[in-house]
Amino acid sequence: MFNLIEAAGWPIWLLILSSLIAVTLIVERLIYLRRKNVIPPKLLDEVIHELKQRGVSTQMLDNLSTGSPLGRVFAAGLKNIKSSPQVMKESIEEAGRGASHEMERFLTTLGTIASISPLLGLFGTLVGMIEIFGAQNAGGSNPAELAHGISVALYNTAFGLIVAIPSMIAYRHFRAMVDSFTIEMEQQAVKLVEIVHGERK
């Protein structure tokens, strides 16, 4: 492994750093964006059941607020349960925007890494080409320096793509997950408002 890094030259360290950051962000988002953490499967039914049994309590709101993004959205709406449906929906929308922003955390960084990794690979390629031309002199070319320049150029191009492709796939996947979760949270929140105000059974 160290021989490969040595053959790729110093520009490879920029790509290694980018790859470490990308892997860290992907693992963190995989853990955070698990469906059961964002949208617990029976949360709406549990909230409706507790509303019918005990009504809204401070403990209930605290549990919802600390439980999951969907719970925070429900808690925002239930804090305004005595207000009109419109006010309740507005508070839910505001909490929903906050939850969506939280789910999108680090995705911009991941997308940036996916975009710049090929450029960093291209930069390494240019460094390798410069070394190749620098190896030329009046007496001919030094084969060892020529080979090193070629390896720098090729390794950096390849590693740039190796970092960029999984990062872009993960970025697109997480963006789709966030959009899907946001829509589902909105649907469940609207359902809660309609049930609370007797518009739906």
Image (cartoon, grey):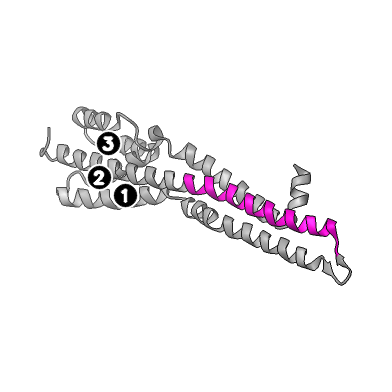
Residue at horizontal 10 percent and vertical 39 percent from the top? 199
Residue 18: give x, y in percent of width and height: 61, 52
Q: Amino acid at mark 3?
A: Ser
Q: Secondary structure at mark 3?
A: loop
Report the residue marked by disc 1: 95
Mark 1 and mark 3 lie on one chain; the one further toward the N terminus is 3
Labels 3, 2: front one: 2
Residue at horizontal 39 percent and vertical 52 percent from the top? 101
> What is the quadrant of residue 74 in the picture?
top left
Q: Is residue 24 above or below residue 131?
A: above
**Mark 1 → mark 2, Cα distance in angstroms:** 8 Å
CB of mark 1 within 8 Å of CB of mark 2?
yes
Q: In the figure, is residue 172 to the left or right of 181? A: right
Predominant secondary structure, magenta span = helix
Report the residue marked by disc 3: 57
> For the magenta stretch, what is the residue range?
141-169
